[in-house]
Image (tube, helix red, strand yellow):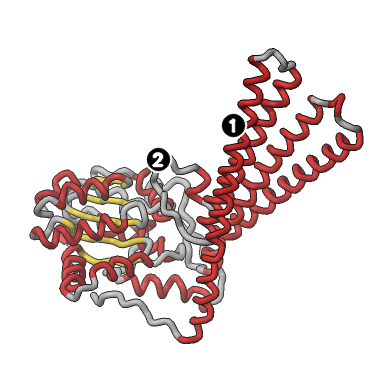
Amino acid sequence: MQPIHSASSPPTTTLGYALFATRWLQAPLYFGLVAAQGVYVYKFFNELWALILRCVTGQATETYVMLAVLKLVDVVMIANLLIMVIVGGYETFVSRIGLQGHRDQPEWLSHVNSNVLKVKLATAIVGISSVHLLQMFVDVHHTSRHSLLWGTVIHMAFIVSAAILAYMSGPMAAHHERAPHREEPGHRPPPAEVPRLEVAIPAQATAPAAETGSHERIRAAGFPARKLLEDFDAEHPRTFDREVVARLGKLDFVTAGENAVFFGPPGTGKTHLAVGLGVRACEAGHRVLFATAAEWAVRLTEAEAAGRLTAELTALDSYPLLIVDEVGYVPFDVDTSRLFFRLVAHRYERASLIVTGDRPPARWDEVFRGAAAPALVDRLAHHAEVVRLDGDSYRQRRATSL
């Protein structure tokens, strides 16, 4: 297997890279918003101190307390809006912050993009407008009818705008998700239930030229043969979790950067399932790379000997899914085990691995030597579906029947 080398950029892309680099000009703007966040913190405590003083001195009426609390809520909501713009905008338009998997990461940041950010900002603005309008109605005796009328009209305009934006973002997101499938007519949409993994996929009448993308990805993946999940003989293994494999067939684990491990005796279909998932990932628009554990060992060893291991691991980031086949058949020394740990650690919570082997991960210390084995298993199994296949060898069964 040949190592991956980054293709040199043609001169015509120099202007494009320069323009793209200008996104860093926005970085000072976000630091300015951080300063504005500090101003709102000061304003919050200033208003809170004034409220406490008037309550302690007995000068605070019920209306004043309600208005003061609403003002505090207003300040907090605007500060929240600032945080959303700072973090979400910087993540989307300047540079990745890289907090994936952090326990304090906001839910919306895990799938932030321009559409999500616009909807979140619109809903935040509606909330702030609601608080302002409530303040006007609470203090209605000191608010003119003209202000009430226009405050209500503006608030309704915000609501309508947010509703339209939310409605438009749904079809846009769906269009984005379906786009690879339209471009790749060979795509087989994963079935909701696959009791035998033998689901007939209707053929799609499309031009042969449009199938080039998925076919090229499948050829470049290095599969030993093209095997499909639908062709797997699910009746052969005595132990086999069909529901887990059906769930893996939806490819959500690839999108989430999670892993899958298939283990069991030889001939039970581990490689078939790994290749079937890899082919389906190629058809869905993902780049995949397949090799045996021994081949990966050679690749990583050669990269380290050439002083380009880090560059090789970085180049592999362009493959959302790597398949490591036949772990356990060849034991590895301490140095090779360390290289496998570097591969797994580099892709941890960033990209997916499918590993097949003859034993469960708990026994991989028999394959990988040294202190790297426990850490390797810990990272690989943290976000992984582990599937056990048990039974007689399918190849031996066929040989006996002949």
Looking at the image, the residue that sits furthest to the bottom is: 11
Quadrant where the N terminus is found in the figure: bottom left
Which comes before the other along the chain, label 2 or label 1?
A: 1
Name the residue that disc number 2 marks. Answer: 103
Q: Nearer the viewer, residue 159 or 255?
A: 159
Q: Is residue 177 left or right of residue 6?
A: right
Q: Is residue 123 left or right of residue 368?
A: right
Residue 378 versus residue 12 in the image, above or below: above
> In the rendering, at what x and y percent does residue 281 appear?
41, 61
Identify the amino acid type marked 1: Phe
Residue 266 versus residue 42 in the image, above or below: below
Residue 331 visible in image: no
Identify the residue at horizontal 59%, vertical 37% (top origin). Answer: 42
Specify the label residue 45 is tagged with. 1
Quadrant where the C terminus is found in the figure: bottom left
CA neighbours of label 1 inside 10 A, class few (<14), some (14 to 19), many (20+): few
Cα distance between the residues tagged 2 and 1: 28 Å
Identify the residue at horizontal 66%, vertical 42% (top origin). Answer: 123
Residue 80 visible in image: yes
Q: Is residue 370 left or right of residue 318?
A: left
Mark 1 secondary-structure assignment? helix
| Discs 2, 1 touching: Cβ within 8 Å | no
> In the rendering, at what x and y percent does residue 104 appear?
43, 40
Residue 74 versus residue 7 in the image, above or below: above
Specify the label residue 360 is tagged with. none
CA neighbours of label 2 inside 10 A, class few (<14), some (14 to 19), many (20+): few
